[in-house]
């Protein structure tokens, strides 16, 4: 799940300066689950903006993810009268959602959220970052614990000398990822895997700058045997 | 072969010390300390932005030490350089005649005085050791041949007090496989703990230089106990250093340090003294430990 947090209201107002009629869009997937851009939050934002002197021409929360161009385009078309009355759009979604909306309209589009990370959701109010989207997954070699994400140094071959009682030198609240990997390998009877020396990571696979028009490779349905 | 490699090959109990480059370009004091150590130690480590605090570079100081007939150990960390810069600096070291390289991961940037810096860690200590091996083999990490093959004597570090110890030893094993020819340890204050560690890694058959830091005061001991991973100063030693008045502390610290060296001398192949500004106490320490 993509984790977001709402920006300070003052920052949102500052970005909307010069725009008086605002249409709002929340996201029906990640931001709804995490409670940063669902129906409740989008409605509240509309109220807050009205109180701050703006006119809200309308709001909608996408049914699918806001970053899905197909469904977001349909939604905006369906509500086009109210969308067209706005001189700016405010999006309560991750950065991908904001940019998706921005390419569908010809007025300024602003973010209401900061996009934080890709997480494991432990409850509706607790999550932890689990993936850095590095493009070269090594979880097969690390007993499904990601040191790229969980070790501040992103080490590939075991812990540094700074861990204490299994905790990280950078933050004593944090478990040392490599001690955790070692212990899980032992528990799984795969301790010998720790001894494999892993080559330096292929950072070329990391998606930076952003990937352009990546096509899905789909298996042919009912294809040749 | 470097003088350090030679001494270890001959089975001599070696002594290394450590100097930290200054923040700035005035090396007067550094060279005075180097001169003070010169006739007492086999080699002197030069730290690489220790604790992530920006200083004059390790390689430049290693070169200056060689000019003053002091054998340097070039400490090189993965914190500030990617694989291109690390390989280049290793070649630079070899071109300047610096053979001993201590391959370290490096402290995290937020520990130091530029906490906003971008941490690099493109390689880690194990792959850095492999890089040294590749260069010695005449090619770079991309497989391209080198014009002139460098010679190195690569070393690494280990923390015998790490809790838990298993992952630490497993990583030490990888460092040996990657080419580490000697190890220097984090400071040790408990000889029996060190003995247990040494027994567990005996099978690696690699020289170990036990780390010694002179206990300057009880406060310093307590600070290390709460802040330095894997370092445990036993209560008796804290009491011992705390029991003497300030002016007598250096003598007491030397006495404790010498005792630790004598106790651990038979367990390892050398001692690495991290001086932390107390370079002048190294000669009496070695004399009292019976190493002069």
Image: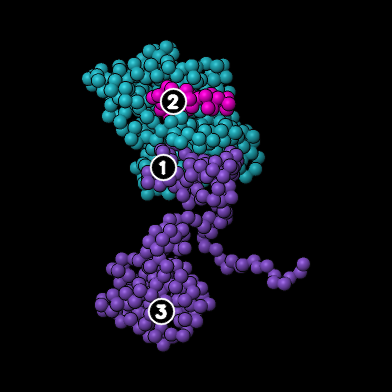
Chain colours: A purple, B cyan
Q: Are marks 1 and 3 in contact (CB under 8 Å)?
A: no
Quadrant where the C terminus of chain A is found in the figure: bottom right
Badge 1 element: loop
Residue A210 seen from this side: yes
* Labels 2 & 1 near each other (Cβ < 8 A): no
From the top left corner, tell me how far across and down residue B282 is, in percent.
37, 19
- Rounded to the nearest whole Å, what is the CA distance between mark 2 and mark 1? 21 Å
In this rendering, which labeled residue sits more in front, label 2 or label 3? 2
Q: Is residue A185 above or below residue B208?
A: below
Q: Are callouts 1 and 3 both on one chain?
A: yes
Q: Please identify the quarter of the rendering in which residue A19 is found.
A: bottom left
Task: Name the residue that disc number 3 marks.
Answer: A60
Q: Residue sitting at 58 percent across and 42 percent down? A: A189
What residue is pinned by disc 2?
Answer: B193
Residues A179 and B146: in front is A179
Q: Is residue A208 magenta?
A: no
Mark 1: few, some, or many residues within 10 Å (few <14, many ≥20)?
A: many
- From this viewpoint, which residue is outermost toward the left? B245
Please, what secondary structure does the residue beneath circle 3 have? Answer: strand
Residue occupying the far bottom of the picture: A81
The magenta stretch spans which residues? B184-212
Query: Label 2 marks which chain's residue?
Result: B
Residue A167 marker: 1
Q: What residue is rendered at 42% in x and 17% in y?
A: B263
Q: Is residue B41 above or below residue A89?
A: above
**Chain identifier of the residue bearing label 1 in the image:** A
């Amino acid at each position: 799940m993509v984790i977001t947090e709402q920006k300070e209201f003052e920052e949102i107002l500052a970005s909307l300066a010069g725009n008086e009629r605002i249409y709002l869009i929340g996201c029906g997937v990640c931001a709804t689950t995490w409670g940063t851009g669902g129906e409740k939050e989008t409605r509240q934002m509309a109220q807050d903006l009205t109180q701050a002197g703006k006119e809200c021409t309308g709001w909608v929360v996408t049914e699918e993810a806001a970053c899905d161009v197909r469904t977001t385009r349909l939604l905006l078309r369906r509500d086009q009268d109210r969308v067209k009355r706005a001189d700016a759009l405010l999006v309560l979604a991750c950065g991908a959602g904001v940019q998706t909306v921005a390419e569908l309209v010809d007025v300024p589009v602003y973010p209401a959220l900061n996009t934080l990370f890709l997480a494991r959701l432990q409850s509706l109010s607790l999550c932890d970052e689990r993936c850095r989207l590095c493009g070269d997954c090594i979880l097969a070699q690390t007993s499904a614990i990601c040191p790229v994400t969980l070790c501040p140094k992103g080490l590939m071959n075991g812990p540094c000398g700074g861990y204490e009682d299994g905790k990280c030198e950078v933050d004593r609240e944090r478990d040392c990822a490599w001690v955790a990997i070692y212990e899980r390998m032992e528990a799984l009877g795969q301790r010998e895997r720790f001894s494999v020396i892993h080559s330096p990571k292929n950072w070329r696979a990391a998606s930076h700058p952003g990937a352009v028009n990546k096509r899905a490779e789909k298996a042919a349905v009912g294809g040749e045997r | 072969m470097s003088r350090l490699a030679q001494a270890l090959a001959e089975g001599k109990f070696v002594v290394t010390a450590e100097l930290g480059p200054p923040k700035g370009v005035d090396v007067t004091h550094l060279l005075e300390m180097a001169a003070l150590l010169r006739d007492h130690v086999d080699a002197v480590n030069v730290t690489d932005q220790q604790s992530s605090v920006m200083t004059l570079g390790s390689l430049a100081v290693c070169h200056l030490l060689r000019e003053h007939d002091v054998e340097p150990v070039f400490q090189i960390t993965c914190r500030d350089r990617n694989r291109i810069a690390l390989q280049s600096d290793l070649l630079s070291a070899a071109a300047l005649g610096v053979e001993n390289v201590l391959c370290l991961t490096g402290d995290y940037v937020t520990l130091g005085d530029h906490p906003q810096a971008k941490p690099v860690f493109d390689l880690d200590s194990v792959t850095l050791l492999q890089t040294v091996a590749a260069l010695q083999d005449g090619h770079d990490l991309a497989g391209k041949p080198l014009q002139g093959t460098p010679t190195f004597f690569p070393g690494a570090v280990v923390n015998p007090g790490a809790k838990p110890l298993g992952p630490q030893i497993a990583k030490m094993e990888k460092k040996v496989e990657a080419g580490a020819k000697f190890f220097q340890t984090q400071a040790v204050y408990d000889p029996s703990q060190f003995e247990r560690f040494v027994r567990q890694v005996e099978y690696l058959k690699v020289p170990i230089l036990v780390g010694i830091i002179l206990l300057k005061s009880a406060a310093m001991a307590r600070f290390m106990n709460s802040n330095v991973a894997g370092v445990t100063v036993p209560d008796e030693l804290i009491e011992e250093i705390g029991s003497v008045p300030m002016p007598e502390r250096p003598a007491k610290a030397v006495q404790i340090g010498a005792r630790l060296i004598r106790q651990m001398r038979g367990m390892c192949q050398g001692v690495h003294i991290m001086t932390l500004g107390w370079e002048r106490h190294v000669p009496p320490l070695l004399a009292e430990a019976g190493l002069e």
